[in-house]
Image (cartoon, rainbow, N blue to C red):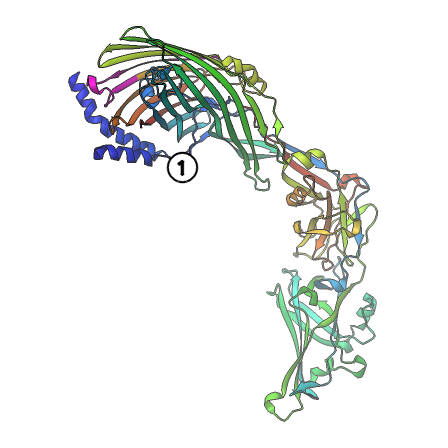
Amino acid sequence: MTAFMAFVRRWSSPALLAAVAVTTAACSEKLLTPVNCPELCPGGQIIVYDTVLNPIPGSDTSFAGYVTANQATGFLVSNNLPAADARGFVRFIRRSDSVFVQDTARTYTIDSVAISLTIDARDSLQPGLALLLYKLPPTVDSAATFAEINAALTPDAFIDSVEVPDTLHTGAVKALLSGETLARVALTPADSGVLRLGVALAAPAATGVRILTIRAGTGAPTFQTYVHAAVTDTALQEVTITRVPNYNSYVTAVPFPVPTPTTLLVGGAPSARALMRFEWPSVLKDTAEIIRATLEMVPVSEVTGLANVSSTIVAQGVLVDLGAKSPLISDVSSSHTFSVPTSAPMPIEVLRTVQLWQGQAGRPPVFFVWLSPEASSFSAPVFGSTATPASQPRLRITYVRPYQFALP
Amino acid sequence: MSARRWTLLALGLLSFPGALQAQASIFGVRGPGFPGRPYSAAAIGSGGSTGMFDPESQLSPASLGPLQTGAASFTLLGDFRSVDTPSGSARVRDYRFPNVFITAPIRRGQYAFGVGATTYLNRDFTLAVRDSIVLRDSVRSYTDTTRSRGGLSDLQLAFAIRTIPQTTIGFAFHLITGTDRLVARRAFDDTLYTPVLQSAELSTTGFGLAIGATRDLSSKVTLSALIRKDFTASVHVDSARYGGATELGSDYGLPWTFGAAGLFRVTPLLQVATQAVYRTWSSANQGMVSLGAPGASNSLELSAGGELTSRVRRTTQFPLRIGVRYGTLPFLIGEDATVQPHEFALSVGTGARFARQKGGIDISLERVWRSASGTDISERGWLLYTGFSIRP
């Protein structure tokens, strides 16, 4: 026994030191344990619910007139495209008959002219595109119809054919005129210094392009005139006059569809938007944690447009429900991108917008659906409404109720 | 004080953790928590059998009887366990303070009092479940994580009367209170579903009264007894995501505790002790079942142990403590057929006093096995208790 206790005394101090060290090493926690339910799970379970809401009958409708063709960020040009046969019309700012050099207005002689257009979208699988540029007479103005513009695209008015390289999906193309071809863009006194440009498309098959406008921010059409000013100093003679459009639009052979009482239309020009109001259950408003929300729009007819070019339908909430003039919640939106042709339902994940409907100060349970780019797409989808129950919009909500934490 | 003892003290102070959290046991998940043990590290070394005689333990207020001078003690617990469930195994580790006690004799030793805190129920756990459900006509896999941090603390004010020869009678008031912070998260594999994340706080309050007595039958035999009643625990939930506290109405009963123990000084160098503690946790059964838990049943803890020292005049220097313990656990598991888990533990420990008996360190290492018959759920672990005490 004495030997044993001597052993205990001998090793107790190291044991104390080791114990303190080991205890110190245990400072970090590691608790995660895989368990099986229900034996080892607290009684409360996360139960997921899935429900489908339809708009309030009769409360869903389309309104037109939001963005007109001349307010769009792109203008459409096509050659017999079934979705929309379109011609472009660009009116540039007036070009003066003199330039200022050394604070003095001086006459000039034109060396060359460049007309630049920026392709924003095209059928990337369609080769052999060429933009046909025409000088339109002053009689063509913003009220011109497709027939009037198309009639003005005559050989006499032809300026140039600008090839669109097959490899160019987006980017600028340019027509450069000099020498004898300058006469095609010569401005007559009747023009009052204003170049009116008609744009058509030539291609081996029916197709189309979207060209950026001045409203796109960048890539606007430009009309550049390279001149020699009447000034003795040769270093000051070369001047470039650049003009951008003050009006830019397009016309279609057949107008885009207009809203009807039984369908929801988005797109077209002037653009249409669809408004949908929902009955918002109190469980979703006050209690539920929503984990997924999907707005499903069902086309009532095949959606056509420009092949291999995507369009997007956008769903946004509104700050207050003022009908057609409801202000949109600008910083939260959801979208679904589609290609044509399609008849498939279009799902839009709208969780963030729907979450804004929750709580006592929640936004009204309303969706505005519109097509992007607005007023510059060959597509104009027509969706079912509550008047067509088989194809009415559906808002599918997946949510959980508060977890019953008290349950052990 | 020698350099070695300074080193011990410095290492002890370094061992304070940044976070005081633990997963007490997988067998506390289906109840309000896993019961704590209000023992000092020294008492743990003898299996808890000396708990009703140890003035640094808080089981019985009568254990203040041997108190000679004021003391402050606290216990650190390092917990290293392996958990086996039908869903897999995990090694978990954690750290907590299960016992803090400040005691002092008053009126020239005629009386003594103590103020302390122990773990009453520990509800620290993190559970992971992998499963799938059918949503929108497709099977969606997900991972659920349920996390709980907190439990109930037992704040004690104890008072002992030592005016009766060979007898100590103790009284204690217990405030049982605590907060349980809970987080439930579900993450779907399909990221179109955002993770579910919900949290809540459970706050619970209750109180209890205890009376204990210790009697020296002879110089070699001391007996002790304890009766304690803890009253209903009142539970509140503050989980509303949109504000507001909710009265849960889910109170549950707390148990009576009956304890008896004997301490036998076999020789001047050897003492042995045995102890039995019975708690009527079945009083919580109805409340547990109404909350959806499998239920609760009475628990029994039996322990025996001894302490062997090498020098009669220096019994506090490196004694060898050993103990054995068996107990049933109060909170049942299982759904259709409920099972009461049980545990078995072996322990060993020692300790030392330094700085003229003013400072002390005790360590105990406990090997514990817990299981529930008829299930594939079990755990085994090493529990390392380190106790520090100061006697100014």
**Magenta extent:** B298-322
Q: Quadrant of the N terminus of chain A?
A: top left
- The residue pinned by badge 1 equals B18
Between residue A78 and residue B80, name the one nearer to us.
Answer: B80
Residues B211 and A304: in front is B211
B319 above or below A370? above
Comparing B370 with A260, the one in front is: B370
Per the image, is A42 magenta? no
- Tag 1 subunit: B
Residue B307 covered by magenta stretch = yes
Give the total number of marks visible in the rendering.
1
Q: Is residue A313 above or below residue A211?
A: above
Horizontal side of A5 relative to A180 (left or right) equals left
Q: Nearer the viewer, residue A238 or B94?
A: B94
Looking at the image, which residue sits at the far left? A3
- Residue B93 visible to an observer of this rendering: no
Q: Residue furthest front?
A: B107
Residue extending farthest to the bottom is A232
Is the residue A276 above or below the residue B53 in the image?
below
Task: Inspect the image, locate mark 1, and give the three-letter code of the amino acid beneath it.
Answer: Gly
Bin the neighbour count of mark 1 within 10 Å (Cα to Cα): few under 14, some 14-19, many 20 and up: few
Q: Is residue A279 left or right of residue A293?
A: right
User: Residue A380: x percent and y percent?
Assistant: 75, 54
In the image: residue A331, left or right of residue B326: right
Report which quarter residue B359 is drawn in. top left
Q: Residue at x 81, y 59 (%)?
A: A255
Q: What secondary structure is marked by label 1?
A: loop
| Residue B36 location (% of width, % of height) | 43, 22
x, y percent for residue B244? 63, 33
Residue at the location (66% across, 41% down)? Answer: A293
Q: Is there any visible trace of residue B152 in the rendered image?
A: yes
Where is residue B164? Give x, y as percent: 36, 9
